[in-house]
Image (spheres, rainbow, N blue to C red):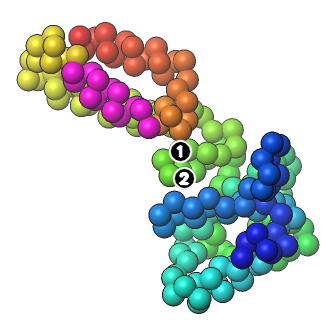
Amino acid sequence: MLRQSNMKGFKIPGVHERLMTTLFADDTTVYLSEFDSYDDLKNILDTWCIASGAKFNTAKTEVLPIGSLVYHSTVLSTRRIHPSQEPLMDGIHIVEDKEPDQILGAWIGNNVDQSAIWSPVIDKIRNSLDQWNKSHPTLFGRCLIIQMIVGGMSQYLATTQGMPKHVVQLLEKIIHNFI
């Protein structure tokens, strides 16, 4: 239904189809350009829900403006994706600049502080290693714990976000202190 609509989505160089949506289990992300209408999207979703018997959770709807800083500010102040459109419903959260928004474990947004995203993971790693340290593991045990805790707790975020150099250095220091 989306691809047959008048909605534009985003054209990505080198990709044949325009980016309009990503789906994973019950999570749906729809990419609206500034020329797309949220009302058109809502009509498509309402039709799909009636046909499928599913229910779309509009309370979890978030809008992340992509484009210039002026565009972000305009969407935030007017609650409109485009000046000619109706404002977004009050219950819809508009993601502000520097505010991270989590989609399938990845943190996205405009001007997001990567350190802030990594802080909870670093804290969790430290706490887990502190707990393990109380059991006085052997050197071999410590190596296994490092692989399990540091590797396990950082791998997904590092894959989806990348790992800033200062985080790599901090994890190396934590590992060194634990060994």
Residue visible at 72% across and 61% down in the picture: 20
| Amino acid type of the residue tagged 1 in the rendering | Ala
Q: Nearer the viewer, residue 5 or 82?
A: 5
Q: Secondary structure at mark 1?
A: strand
Q: Which residue is mark 2?
A: 103
Give the percent coordinates (x, y) of residue 68.
Answer: 84, 46
Work out whether 73 lies above or below 110: below
Instruction: Determine the CA span between mark 1 and mark 2.
Output: 5 Å
**Residue 106 shows which numbered tag?**
1
Q: Nearer the viewer, residue 155 or 61?
A: 155
**Predominant secondary structure in magenta?**
helix
Work out whether 136 lies above or below 162: above
Pointers 1 and 2 in contact (C-beta within 8 Å): yes
Work out whether 5 lies above or below 32: below
Q: Is residue 165 left or right of residue 84?
A: left
User: Residue 63, can we see it?
Assistant: no
Residue visible at 62% across and 82% down in the picture: 48
Q: Look at the image and give the residue range highlighted in magenta.
A: 144-156
Tell me the quarter of the image containing the C terminus. Answer: top left
Residue visible at 40% across and 31% down in the picture: 154
| Amino acid type of the residue tagged 2 in the rendering | Ile
User: Residue 62, can we see it?
Assistant: yes
Q: Is residue 179 left or right of residue 46?
A: left
Give the percent coordinates (x, y) of residue 25.
Answer: 47, 64
